[in-house]
Amino acid sequence: MAGDRELVLAANQAFYRCFEKKDLEAMEAVWSKGIGCLCIHPGRDALKGWVDIRDAWARIFANTSYLEIDTDILTVEVSGDLAYVVLVENVLQISQGRRLQARSMATNGFERMAGRWYMTHHHGSPVVD
């Protein structure tokens, strides 16, 4: 059986897979629906609660024709039913005919509920080279 660290990494990978595929239904399955959930996209205000977070993902997906995301995991920490992953996101996005490449430092928080890890927090900050 996989340990907590591997299960958290699998949940983190599932998040980036649905992000790349622009799959809102899969994104909904990854996130907790708790009112305390937070999502902070690079350069944006904090979104609190699944309804606002979902709306933001829907807008991103609708306005993006292609996404490719490679991640470099820096650390994974697990303490009881809480965990976080700190990583670098290398993002290639094609939106409205424009090719955008960006690097973000991200922290993804997870909570184990009913034996499964759900995202409760995503915070991306631009990396300035």
Image (cartoon, helix red, strand yellow):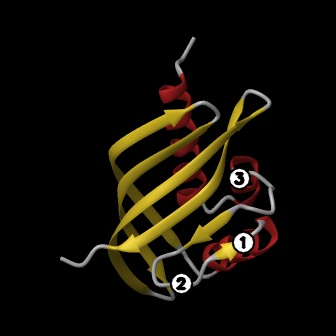
Where is mark 3, residue-wise?
Answer: 31
Q: Percent x, y for residue 11?
A: 58, 40
Residue at position x 71%, y 52% from top?
A: 31
Identify residue type, mark 2. Answer: Arg
Q: Percent x, y for residue 14?
A: 58, 44
Q: Please, what secondary structure does the residue beneath circle 1 have? A: strand
The residues tagged by marks 3 and 2 sit, at their Cα atoms, a distance apart of 19 Å
Q: Please, what secondary structure does the residue beneath circle 2 have? A: loop
Q: Is residue 80 above or below residue 121?
A: above
Q: Is residue 116 above or below residue 97?
A: above
The residues tagged by marks 3 and 1 sit, at their Cα atoms, a distance apart of 12 Å
Q: Is residue 108 above or below residue 90?
A: above
| Pointer 3 or 1: first along the chain | 3
| Pointer 3 or 2: first along the chain | 3
Q: Quadrant of the C terminus?
A: bottom left
Identify residue type, mark 1. Answer: Lys
Residue at position x 53%, y 74% from top?
A: 41
- In which image quadrant can residue 93 be found? bottom left
Q: Tell me: 24 left or right of 86.
A: right
Within 10 Å of the Cα at label 2, are there few (<14), some (14-19), or many (20+) other Cα atoms? few
Where is mark 2, residue-wise?
Answer: 44
Identify residue type, mark 3. Answer: Trp
